[in-house]
Structures are given as C-alpha cells and as structure tokens.
Image (cartoon, helix red, strand yellow):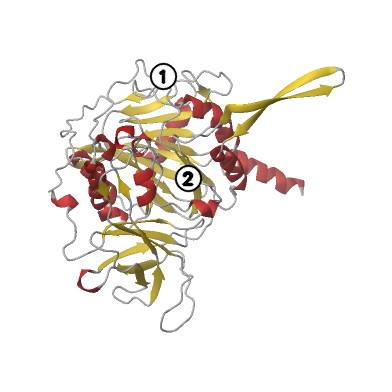
C-alpha cells in the first residue's frame, strides 16, 4: 500500500510539474527555544576514565566505499593511535595506525585529534597476511587502550552496481539545541546507512574567544551517537568559515579542517572542501559554496587574433581549482555503474524564502548548465532554516532566476537547512508561492532518500513535531539517466543491430 501511494504521488508530481505552484504547509511549529543545550547536559558527556577517546566519527575513506576514516579525540595526552578491528565483536584480528595532531585557535587548545584510515591494506600483526575490507560487511572496531578503550562498529556499503540499494539521510544546519537533538534522534530511527550533511555543523562561531573551541568539542560529542557508526559525508557552510580578525584568526575553515577529514584526494581534488565519492549506486559530489568556484577576473590578459581581415579579442580568464575539478569529475561519472548523481552544497540555488533569496545566484550562473547537461538527479542544500522542494526546473532558457521554467533535464532542488540550530526558523516565505516550488514548510526535520534500484528512489521529508517524527512530504524520484528516454534509446539500439 505504501509503495502504491508513493507511485501515485509520483504521478501527481509529474502531472503538475509544468506550471502549477505546489503547497505551502499551514503547519505552525510549536518550537522549543532555539538556545544551545547547556554544556553540563548528558548529551555532551565525555566517557569516564583517563584519556578516554571521545568525539568519535567516521566518514568514507576512498572513492568506492571500501574504506573508512575514523577520527577521535583524547583530552590528556596523545595515547594510542591504533584502531583494532575485525569481523566479530571483541575479536580484533587486524590493526591500522593513524596520525595524531592538535592545534590552537586564539586561546583555545584542542585535544589530541586522531585520524586513521581503515582500508584493509594493513597486515594481521600475528599472521602477517593482508586483509581487505569487503562490501556489505559489518566490522567492529576498538580505539583507546586499557580500561578506557571504547568499542564501535561500522558497515561497508554494497558493491558499486547500478541496482545496489542504499538509504541516505540528509541533514543541514544542525547546531546543538534541543531541536537539534530531536532531529538527530529522529534521523537515527530511520535506519539510514549514510548521512549526507549539507553544511553548518556546530554553530560554534556564534561564540567568542575560548568558547568557540569548546562548542566544537561539545558538538563532536553530541553527534557521536550516530557518527561513530554511520559515515557522515561532510560539506561546509558559512558557519564553518570563522573569520575573526579581532582574535587574530583569519584562516577560513580552520576548526573544521582539523576535525573533519574527507577523502578528497581519492577523487583528485586539491581541497578537502570539495570532493566526490561513489557509494552503492550513487555518485555523490560535495561542493563548497564559500570557496571560489567560477572565473577569476582579477587577473586577465587580452589576446588579439587576426581572423581573415578581422580582429578578434579574447578575454583569457583563470578558472578556479573547484571549477576545474568539477569539470573533470562530471566527465568521470559512469551512469551505467552509478546511475544516481547527487550534489551537495550549502547555499540553495533555488529558494522562495525571504531568507537568503537569490544568494547563490553566482553559483547558479556558473554550474546550472552542467547540472542539466549531466542530468543530475537531485541537489541538496541547507542555509535557509526551513524545508523546500522544487520541481525539475532551470533558468537556462529564461535566464531569470525568480521565474525558471520546467526542464526535464534539470535536478530536483531540495533545501534541508532545518536541522535545529539556535538561529531559529526562517518562517517568511515569499507570497505567492512560485510555480517552481512543490512543497515548503518552516519546521525542523530531516530527509531520507532510499535508492531501490537504477530507476526509482523513495524520498521523504520528516518533520519534528513535539518530539515525534512525522513523515510529511514524499514522492518517488525517477532516475534521470535510466528513465523513459534511456529505455527508448536502448530499444532503438537493439533494433538497429
């Protein structure tokens, strides 16, 4: 029955996507106060014992999902930087050795941050033979030493295959309020295997001096209940920039980069702030909305060419590393192997809220034609503290962002900046609701995307309603590559042989 309802909603979406505005929810959120949870609350509790590991979190460690990066912090001294792991709980036959570092931010000094790549290329320290991680396998791991060692687990994704199923949860703008806690707990109830995070993690930048680092620590402990088990794929937001000239701190993303590694080198990226991974049947690209991404006009030259009898003047522009990397990465996407193409960014390209309206216009101008050309399935963003889903639309024909037109080659744009941070909800939508907007609501929540096969995925947005998780917006997402057009092409190819 649930599948039938989802299929019906998909047909309904298709029938109205070419010109009718969607729904603005009338739900009024009776929100808890948008204040950070006090530091003495149990959600921030550090494990007892001398130098016990805490702030444990994992992310994908390679391009194809057969490795994880495990990160943790020890407060008193470096301690052990070894991860012990195996196929049975309490039986750790294999080890991996990581690195350890700490840093200062103004007058705050971090704990000792450990990062360890577990990719199966290590050797059994007793038997001396190589052990490679396998797909769709649960591994148990232990960090720390002696009485204060701690035990966790992770599961590798299915093999790269067009029909590999996988369930993602999507969270943005989380923070560390009671609303944030509700979002995190509800997300954990969904059984999602991977978390896609679209920026604005701790909101520690709303503090000052030493408290900035303290609130990064508290947030790391806050999300450990999920992030130590399910890999979180990170992208950054404006609250990670942390530009504080009055503190002498002017290096952007400094706290974030020390704490949250990404497998950027595996996709030949030059920066941890933008990268790509393949996971099950999905190719996931994370972009940085607050790093240069287009043409740099600051330095240019003019080349004069003689073509026939006419002079041609060419403006030579310099393209940014993120632009050049994305150009190459999109060419590498193989929809025969990973049919689902998903993009993460922080600032939404399409948004009908008064908050941050048209703020990502420059990124739209630079990248929208690529998103349509390569038939990106869905783009998730945050930044606006509300929920909104668009139809498949673009401004390529009209070149007017405030009134884009229906475009079957375009992505669905979904804004999930509704995690629950202390800045509160963005509850002032533009009126009337524009034709490109399918559903919008000013509430806290999170989304799930459950890929079933190469052609269909089930999408849900789940509202936080006074401590309950309430599925509120849902539809069937049809794959852009393996849709009707692809089936028609394959049929013609068979007849032409």
Above or below residue 166? Residue 457 is: above
| Residue 425: x %, y % from top left | 26, 29
| Residue 61: x %, y % from top left | 45, 58
Q: Is residue 126 left or right of residue 211?
A: right
The residue that appears at 30% across and 35% down in the rendered structure is: 418
Above or below residue 68? Residue 204 is: above
Q: Which residue is mark 2?
A: 456
The residue that appears at 47% across and 62% down in the rendered structure is: 66
Q: Which residue is mark 1?
A: 434
Question: Label 2 vs label 1: CA separation?
Answer: 27 Å
Q: Which mark is residue 416?
A: none
User: Which secondary structure lies at badge 1?
Assistant: loop
Q: Is residue 298 left or right of residue 439?
A: right
User: Which secondary structure lies at badge 2?
Assistant: strand
Above or below residue 184? Residue 437 is: above
| Residue 120: x %, y % from top left | 46, 69
The reply to whether residue 283 is visible in this rendering is no
């Amino acid at each position: 029955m649930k599948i039938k309802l989802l299929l019906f909603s998909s047909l309904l979406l298709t029938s109205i996507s070419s010109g009718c505005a969607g729904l603005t929810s009338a739900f009024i959120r009776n929100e808890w106060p948008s204040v950070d949870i006090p530091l003495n609350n149990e959600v921030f509790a550090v494990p007892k014992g001398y130098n016990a590991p805490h702030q444990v979190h994992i992310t994908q460690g390679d391009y194809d999902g057969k490795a994880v990066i495990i990160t943790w912090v020890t407060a008193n001294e470096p301690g052990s930087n070894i991860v012990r792991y195996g196929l049975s709980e309490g039986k750790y036959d294999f080890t991996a050795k990581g690195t350890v570092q700490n840093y200062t931010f103004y007058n705050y000094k971090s704990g000792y941050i450990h990062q360890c790549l577990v990719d199966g290329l290590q050797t059994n320290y007793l038997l001396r033979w190589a052990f490679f991680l396998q797909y769709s396998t649960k591994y148990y791991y232990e960090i720390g030493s002696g009485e204060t060692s701690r035990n966790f687990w992770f599961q590798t994704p299915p093999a790269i295959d067009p029909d590999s199923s996988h369930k993602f949860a999507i969270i943005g703008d989380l923070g560390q309020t009671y609303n944030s806690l509700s979002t995190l707990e509800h997300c954990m109830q969904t059984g999602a295997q991977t978390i896609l995070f679209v920026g604005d993690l701790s909101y520690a930048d709303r503090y000052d001096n030493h408290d900035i680092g303290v609130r990064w620590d508290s947030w790391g402990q806050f999300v450990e209940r999920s992030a130590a088990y399910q890999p979180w794929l990170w992208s950054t937001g404006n609250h990670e920039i942390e530009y504080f000239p009055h503190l002498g701190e002017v290096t952007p993303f400094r706290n974030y980069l020390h704490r949250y590694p990404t497998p950027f080198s595996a996709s030949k990226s030059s920066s941890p702030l933008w990268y790509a991974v393949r996971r099950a049947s999905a190719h996931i690209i994370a972009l940085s909305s607050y790093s240069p991404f287009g043409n740099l006009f600051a330095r240019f030259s003019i080349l004069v060419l003689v073509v026939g009898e006419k002079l041609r003047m060419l403006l030579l522009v310099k393209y940014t590393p993120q632009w050049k990397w994305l150009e190459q990465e999109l060419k590498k996407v193989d929809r025969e192997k990973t049919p689902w193409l998903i993009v993460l960014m922080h600032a939404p390209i399409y948004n009908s809220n008064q908050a941050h309206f048209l703020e990502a216009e420059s990124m739209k101008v630079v990248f929208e034609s690529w998103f349509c050309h390569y038939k990106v399935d869905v783009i998730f963003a945050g930044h606006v503290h509300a929920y909104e889903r668009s139809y498949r639309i673009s401004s390529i024909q009209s070149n007017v962002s405030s009134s884009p037109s229906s475009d079957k080659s375009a992505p669905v744009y979904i804004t999930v900046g509704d995690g629950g941070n202390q800045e509160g909800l963005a509850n002032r939508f533009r009126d009337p609701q524009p034709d490109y907007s399918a559903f919008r609501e000013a509430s806290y929540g999170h989304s799930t995307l459950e890929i079933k096969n190469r052609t269909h995925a089930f999408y849900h947005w789940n509202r936080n309603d006074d401590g309950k998780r309430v599925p509120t917006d849902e539809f069937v997402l049809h794959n852009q590559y393996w849709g009707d057009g692809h089936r028609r092409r394959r049929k013609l190819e068979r007849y032409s042989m």
